[in-house]
Amino acid sequence: MATRPEVRGDIRDIGLAEQGALKIAWADRQMPVLAGIRERFAVERPLDGWRISACLHVTAETANLMRTLMAGGADAVLCSSNPLSTQDDVAASLVADHGIPTYAIKGEDRDSYYGHIAAALDHAPQVTMDDGADLVTELHTRRTELLDGVVAGTEETTTGVIRMRAMAAAGKLRFPVLAINEAATKHLFDNRYGTGQSAIDGILRATNVLIAGKQVVVGGYGWVGRGIAARAAGMGGIVTVVEVDPTRALEAAMDGFRVANAATAAEVGEIFIAATGNLNVWGAAHFPKMRDGTILANAGHFNDEFELPALEAQSVSSREVRPFTREYTMADGRRIYLLADGRLVNLGAAEGHPALVMDMSFANQALGLEWLRANAATLQPQVYTIPDEIDRDVARLKLASMGIQIDPMTPDQQAYSESWESGT
């Protein structure tokens, strides 16, 4: 029997490792692009010796990304980017079977969450990998003594990119960050198809409600909101979109959805799904308008999209009625149901995105790190969009894995597309 690596990290139960290994292997079979990159990394070792601190959702898909980084020679540690997104069996397998120090426990409190981020930063990273920018924020506020050793970082999600761009605009960002979220093969697929499916999945697992015939209100019509609205409508939901951006609101209307302001939507909705990455989409002024039995679910990264202190203040009692479903009884007897503590419902109440779509997102992460290793010395402390050639390579690899062939341009077509002389 093989000897397992030394246990390092803070996880719920090392005894869950066998179950986690099965889950990681299942995801790996649906991540052929990342698997191919891992095979090449094992030979070329493009990340050799790089210390990486990763703050990501600890899922089976993330485990396969971490395996890829280690195959490429990285010295990596992992902590969770959200208190509810950890899969405890996966965390156990990462530690027991792969020797990757992991600091993550599903349902951890705030102190444990930030303690785990601190433990990941104790690794003195040369590179950060973030999903939501909590690790980088801690690095720039409480662990500034480590900043001089950081070469570069990556950011996985919309919320984190927004935060890091704000840091860069304020002159506070101290190293270059590659915005993985801005890759077309990430936001067009992961955000739209991944969250579109997995957010609905989380709602169904938490409540077992029927979507068909329900008034579903989607807050935000970015790529995540588009995906959720499309999936809810596809299941028979009657979808209303709330948006502050006039162009996106117009797009939602022309996609066939009702568009309304937050107050109007509050009166008609039965299921509210927030997908804005912003603050208090629905709050103190809206809760009194909501129907008895209203369900609140957040698909954004932080639990800020519903004004939870106001919900607590306006209710007379609350109780857990199903796993990840809390019932708030209001003064007039109405009940409002909050899913996954208002945190990202797809990972809080379900398993997150399907591995098939995360294959592209994490392929961008792996190839983005390889690009940073080659180019970091020439980059400024700002947020960079992932190079188009990486994006296109990921798309080509994904098409090949699906058995799909496309034509390249002919030389004449290429010349025509680059010329200005030809006319009518």
Image (tube, rainbow, N blue to C red):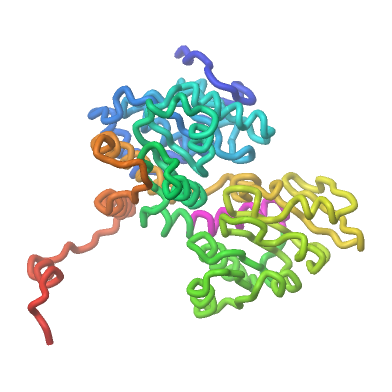
Residue 307 picture location, percent across and down: 72, 55
| Residue at 65 percent of width and 46 percent of height | 349
Residue 125 picture location, percent across and down: 42, 26
Which residue is the extreme one toward the front? 171
In the image, taking residue 82 as reference, residue 174 lies left or right, namely left
Q: Quadrant of residue 188?
A: bottom left
In the image, residue 395 lies in the stretch drawn in magenta: no
The quadrant of the rendering that contains the C terminus is: bottom left
Q: In this rendering, is residue 34 above or below 207?
A: above
Q: In this rendering, is residue 286 above or below 21?
A: below
Instruction: Judge by depth and name the residue closer to the eye, 273 or 311.
Output: 311
Q: Which residues, given as a range, are shown in magenta? A: 193-208
Which residue is the extreme one toward the bottom? 424
Residue 201 picture location, percent across and down: 61, 54
In the image, residue 206 lies in the stretch drawn in magenta: yes
Q: In this rendering, is residue 74 above or below 305?
A: above
Give the main secondary structure of the magenta stretch.
Answer: helix
| Residue at 9 percent of width and 80 percent of height | 422
- Residue 293 seen in the current view: yes
| Residue at 77 percent of width and 50 percent of height | 309
Instruction: Judge by depth and name the residue closer to the eye, 44 or 177.
Output: 177
Instruction: Judge by depth and name the residue closer to the eye, 205 or 325.
Output: 325
Residue 100 picture location, percent across and down: 46, 23
In the image, taking residue 415 as reference, residue 71 lies left or right, namely right
- Residue 18 seen in the current view: no
